[in-house]
Amino acid sequence: MSQTLTMLAAAAPLAAGWSLHSRRLNRRIEVARRDPLTGLLTRDPFQARGRRVAGAGAFAVVVIDLDGFKQINDTYGHAAGDAVIAASGQRLGEWSGSHSGVAGRLGGDEFAAVIRVSRARELRAAMNALTASLAEPVEFEEHLLRVGASAGVVQQLTGNGVADLSQLMRRADEVMYGVKQTGGGWMAASHATPAYRTVNGRRDGRRGTSGEAA
């Protein structure tokens, strides 16, 4: 018995050390999965988590692009732009969490979310609240910085564990681009199938394709 107790006592510090190492490693992995400016998930982790939300019941996929962001950068500098991105990401994260969903930053001033929503009127209320929240001014060095948002939405009334989230995001992106061309706000897609071809995995005409930058 005494030998067993001695072995256990000797092993305890090793176990504690390994547990601490595991927690630190998990924290580092989580940090690597998140955008450092906003704290939101980056594209691949966002899509992985978004698929889980989509598999749990009725849901909506949202792609958002800020309006007037370039003017903020050009007028006040990139630090001001970073402040707007950080505030927008925080607001989007809180909004998606309130709808049992997840949000991510896709890059630049482009974001996405997958939320649980089952009725058209519920979606309207949620999207109106989001666009109003993103339009709230951001304080930066005694300035009130204002941007708007354009958002495209694809709503699915039933959960689907094998939902092609990439396809739904492409369709939401198409709708968002149309909304942006008409002055901002949001619109829900009438169908879930992308209407335009893709180049390098993105809608033709987006940055990173051979067409005109959106």
Image (tube, helix red, strand yellow):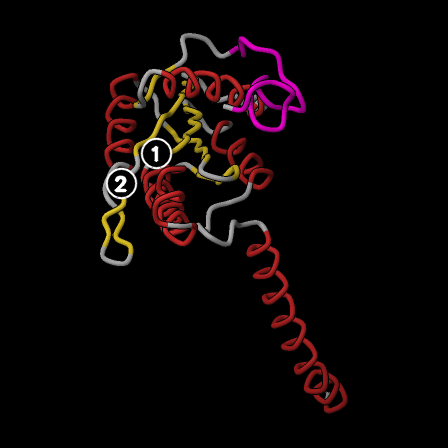
Q: Which mark is residue 187?
A: none
- x and y percent of residue 163 in the render? 56, 21
Q: Are marks 2 and 1 in contact (CB under 8 Å)?
A: yes
Does the magenta run of residues contain 203?
yes
Residue 25 occupies which quadrant of the picture?
Answer: bottom right
Determine which residue is flagged by label 1. 68
Residue 117, horizontal then vertical, whole percent: 35, 25
User: Which sits earlier in the primary sequence, circle 2 or circle 1?
Assistant: 1
Q: Amino acid at mark 1?
A: Gly
Q: Residue at x 53, y 20 (%)?
A: 170
Magenta range: 193-213
Q: Secondary structure at mark 2?
A: loop
The amino acid at mark 2 is: Arg
Q: Relative to residue 139, is residue 184 depicted above or below?
A: above
Question: Which numbered tag is attached to residue 146?
Answer: 2
By secondary structure, the bulk of the magenta-drawn segment is best described as loop
> Rounded to the nearest whole Å, what is the CA distance between mark 2 and mark 1?
8 Å
Pick whichever, 100 or 82, lies toward us. 82
Q: Is residue 211 magenta?
A: yes
Q: Which class describes the residues within 10 Å of circle 2: few (<14), some (14-19), or many (20+)? A: some
Task: Please give left or right for residue 62 compared with residue 107 in the image.
Answer: left
* Residue found 29% across the figure and 27% down from its top: 127
User: Where is residue 181, by image quadrant?
Assistant: top left
Q: Return the residue nearer the eye: 131 or 55.
A: 131
Q: Identify the residue shown where x is 65% and y is 70%.
A: 21
Q: Is residue 118 left or right of residue 9?
A: left
